Amino acid sequence: MVLAILKEVELQRNYLQGESIKTIYFGGGTPSLLEQSDLDTILKKINEIHEVAGDAEITLEANPDDLTLEKLKQLSDSPINRLSIGTQSFSEVDLKFMNRAHNSKEAIECIENAKKLGFENMTIDLIYGTPTMSDEQWEMNMQTAFDFEIPHLSCYCLTVEPNTALDHFVKNKKAQPVDEERAARQFERLIDHCNEEGYDHYEISNFGKKGWYSKHNSAYWLGEKYLGIGPAAHSFDGISRQWNISHNAKYIAALKEGKLLSEKEELTPESRYNEYVMTSLRTIWGTDFNKIEKGFQSHFLKEIETYQQSKDVIQNGDTFSLSKKGKLLADRIASDLFV
């Protein structure tokens, strides 16, 4: 797999057209299973082919049970300068419900060890709205994160995806469905509590202290180009999307022959408009009316008027942003603005 990834980096050398690399993200799957030598080899290849900014954000995504003390020591001596830890909850009941491999003790020890080893730039994932999570436990989860002084939080509402184990359990009444009222209540408390603790709610699911926003995620929301390497990885060059085959063995076999199995889609004006509205409206920066192609501006103004009247959307000059109340309806509002 590592050799295939190195080959793809070479084949895709011109995708970003010489732009400087500001962020590198090891995510998707379980990148923490890579040996340190593998990470170093991949980073060396990227630096050989691309100009990497001196202050580039280099993130590794991992679960607490994978980030042993020994693993963290290795990472602290590597170019990795940001950790994204899939904590999900500090409650044993929640973790068992979500079928997580780690327990609460491991989650806490992982964060403690990472901080002792000098990882300041850190984010953790938290999930709210689970049937097992009371409002009191959600408060405890948030407070634990605040007590650790973690500068960035990614918080998601539990969703029941079709054809998953959870979907099966809910349909067979072995698990309770998501209580939407409780989930909304917990989301609103999250917004308030993070504001009290000095976090900016800079994207629907993301909260960061000043100077600690995710460069990687921000680039995506702001419509910048990105190159994805590996099975099922997606790339965007500003006018088209490209995605690799998701089958590991076929991905490796093709690259052994110097070929990349991928598909490409040229974005239509309608797609570019829809994507811009969807991503920008979710952020603190909002939707800039001047960035909407003229052919869609009248449609945008017509459809958004209802949400301005209900005060779900606030206009400031040429920028449209969601109010606190509107953030509860982000997906619905965006879909109503689509063409």
Image (cartoon, rainbow, N blue to C red):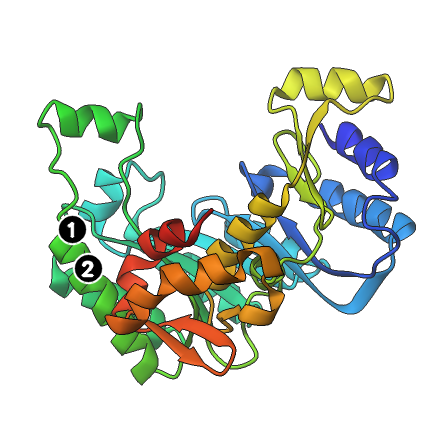
Q: Toward the viewer: 64 or 212?
A: 212
* Horizontal side of residue 199 vs 115, given as left or right: left
Q: Residue at x 87, y 37 (%)?
A: 10
Which secondary structure lies at badge 2?
helix
Pointers 1 and 2 in contact (C-beta within 8 Å)? yes
* Horizontal side of residue 268 vs 319, given as left or right: right
Q: Residue at x 31, y 23 (%)?
A: 163
| Image location (x, y in percent) of residue 77 | 70, 61
* Horizontal side of residue 88 vs 182, given as left or right: right
From the viewer's perspective, is residue 90 above or below residue 119? Answer: above
Q: Amino acid at mark 1?
A: Glu
Q: Toward the viewer: 221 or 313?
A: 313
Q: Residue furthest left?
A: 173
Dot 2 corresponds to which residue? Answer: 184
Can residue 70 be spotted in the picture?
no
| Image location (x, y in percent) of residue 104 | 29, 53
Q: How many marks?
A: 2
Q: Amino acid at mark 2?
A: Ala
Dot 1 corresponds to which residue? Answer: 180
| Image location (x, y in percent) of residue 260 | 78, 25
